[in-house]
Amino acid sequence: MVMKFKMSKNVICYAWLSVCLSSAIPAFAVQPTLKPSDISIPAISEESQLATKRATTRLTQSHYRKIKLDDDFSEKIFDRYIKNLDFSHNTFLQSDIDELRQKYGTKLDEQLSQGDLSAAFDIYDVMMKRRYERYTYALSLLDKEPDLNGQDQIEIDREKAAAPQTEADANKLWDARVKNDIINLKLKDKKWSEIKAKLTKRYNLAIRRLTQTKADDIVQIYLNAFAREIDPHTSYLSPRTAKSFNESINLSLEGIGTTLQSEDDEISIKSLVPGAPAERSKKLHPGDKIIGVGQATGDIEDVVGWRLEDLVEKIKGKKGTKVRLEIEPAKGGKSRIITLVRDKVRIEDQAAKLTFEKVSGKNIAVIKIPSFYIGLTEDVKKLLVKLENQKAEALIVDLRENGGGALTEAVALSGLFIADGPVVQVRDAYQRIRVHEDDDATQQYKGLLFVMINRYSASASEIFAAAMQDYRRGIIIGQNTFGKGTVQQSRSLNFIYDLDQSPLGVLQYTIQKFYRVNGGSTQLKGVAADINFPEIIDAKEYGEDKEDNALAWDKIPSASYTEVGNIDYIDNAVNILNEKHLARIAKDPEFVALNEELKVRNERRDRKFLSLNYKMRKAENDKDDARRLKDLNERFKREGKKALKDIDDLPKDYEAPDFFLKEAEKIAADFVIFNSDQKINQANGLSEAKTESKK
């Protein structure tokens, strides 16, 4: 059984082409290269109809959350399908949505059960027509360079905004969008002639993508509107997407090791595969947008508006070859080009790794665990032997960015740190509870233990961290985890007796929820740290509780277990360690600089609008660059390195220090000292008691 952290907006290779246009266009304006007649909806296939029927049966009968597929649920599917097709609400007019709702809003439940895809394809057809109109209008705006000196603004997040009432309202949205595209290119020192050529090509390419729509694309988006309405980790993978997914699971792809997601015209990094080139480079982060791709030589190709599958194909390539990515950082600022060498993702690259660090004279060990892969526990056993041979005085198990893996490994790994007992409880759709236990009385490691987590620690990582916390076996440090407390399984929609049946795709759906030994779920709430670090991953943007239909938090009876740590002793230690930690990071220049960055991030996160005044945008960019250059040069001065004159002079292979881990090691050293002092005090107390007794 596999539990993998999969945030769920649009996943792995699903790309819905989000783009659009309209209005009367002057004769002299830039025109699209394709005519409306060139765009047509693909035909519905028998395979798609059969896949729809089987997916509907499976989801209504086997999912953990029991739903009633009725008119009310049909309306919810309709809303989510519209949202999937028009995430920023700048394509459909409100009148389109009203007419389509009147026609199909309460009929999707019946159509799904019958394998009828007429509503899905009709709605998609309207969307394609509107997108053509919207992009045609966008092209017309490129006839002359716009005035970027006004007070215009663009709404940053239109996910919950109303659809435009009229074509004029839609045009206003696209006026702002095109200006924003122009400013983004102008900030890269592009001249108007270059900007016009690039955007003309980009918008025409977006229109051409409409002609490349396949029936499988539409079915996948539609069935995912149904699946995701049940819960955010349930999804349908079309045959092509399922093939790509299986290849990545089998580690047979040669590429850079990223999971991508698409929203509107933008493709961003969802997660990084541990041990793969992207993760090893330390140059890419979740949320970064990929706006251009190039090979080792030649031009960087603009990929804004591309289908996700096509971008994946562009990035993949033979081992040892180079690919260049133009990235817009998630935290904002100038785009940058990074070069990665393609490689196969090997299991050994994802294996747990052991390091040692001397801190305040104390020998601190760190085991970094990128994922809960099969064989993890055996690997960690060997590392624990090395750890003891090296006389480590404390251990940090680093689960940052660990999105999960095998449940069996989470249970077995926990067993290395406790003698025996329950580790996690699992409840299925029929309310049956099963307790997974460590039934091996052997405790491999009995020393001081810390578990380091962050917002991207999820699923199996949360099981391990929660078990160590509930048993009072270890101290949890870092940031509150993701909050994914559900288990999924994958099932092909092809049956054994389908001898000549073409592939129908795969359904991934939730079958269980897991619970801590204390009875509480990690769903939504995750695992809270005992000692908190700054929220470098924005909890207001990422986490299970950000999903609008995540399964609820709940509780079941506690399993029978005994805490192995002394509650008062641990609580006292945590309080003392936390005081030292807070005092230290308040003066640490790395954390001081980080806190300034986080203030800027939080202020910008709360913005609803972004200026379309070029001078204002450039001033903000320059200020960001100046702040970053100052922080880097202060770090270089501390490290005895030469200062940079310009932020662009930063070496492409520069890797920032992991000052979070360094602070965690200092906390561990503090605990070693605290523990030693307590033993001395106890010994002195016993000695005094014996002396009094003799008297």
Image (cartoon, grey):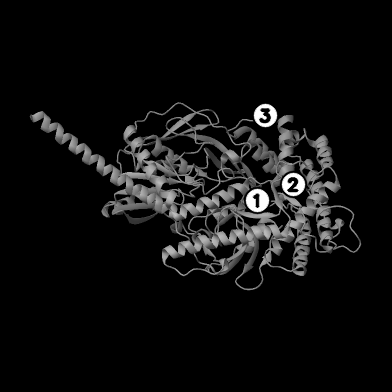
Q: Residues within 10 Å of mark 3 (few under 14, many from 20)?
A: few
Image height check: is 47 above or below 106? below
Q: Please tell me which of labels 2 and 1 falls first in the chain.
A: 2
The x and y percentages for residue 663 are: 40, 51
Q: Is residue 50 visible?
A: yes
Nearer to us: label 2 or label 3: 2
For label 3, the residue is 68
Q: Amino acid at mark 3?
A: Lys
Taking the spot 73% from the left edge, 34% from the top edge, the residue there is 74
For label 2, the residue is 86
The x and y percentages for residue 73 are: 70, 32
Image height check: is 415 above or below 644? above
For label 1, the residue is 239
Residue farthest to the left?
Answer: 695
Taking the spot 90% from the left edge, 59% from the top edge, the residue there is 26
The numbered dot on residue 286 is none
Q: Please tell me which of labels 3 and 1 falls first in the chain.
A: 3
Q: Secondary structure at mark 1?
A: helix
495 horizontally vs 512: left or right: right
Nearer to us: label 3 or label 1: 3
Label 2 close to label 3 by CB (< 8 Å): no
Q: Amino acid at mark 2?
A: Asp
Q: Secondary structure at mark 3?
A: loop
Q: Amino acid at mark 1?
A: Pro
Q: Secondary structure at mark 2?
A: loop
Q: Residues within 10 Å of mark 1 (few under 14, many from 20)?
A: some
Taking the spot 52% from the left edge, 39% from the top edge, the residue there is 483
The x and y percentages for residue 170 are: 82, 48
Image height check: is 569 above or below 222? above
Q: Quadrant of the C terminus?
A: top left
306 horizontally vs 358: left or right: right
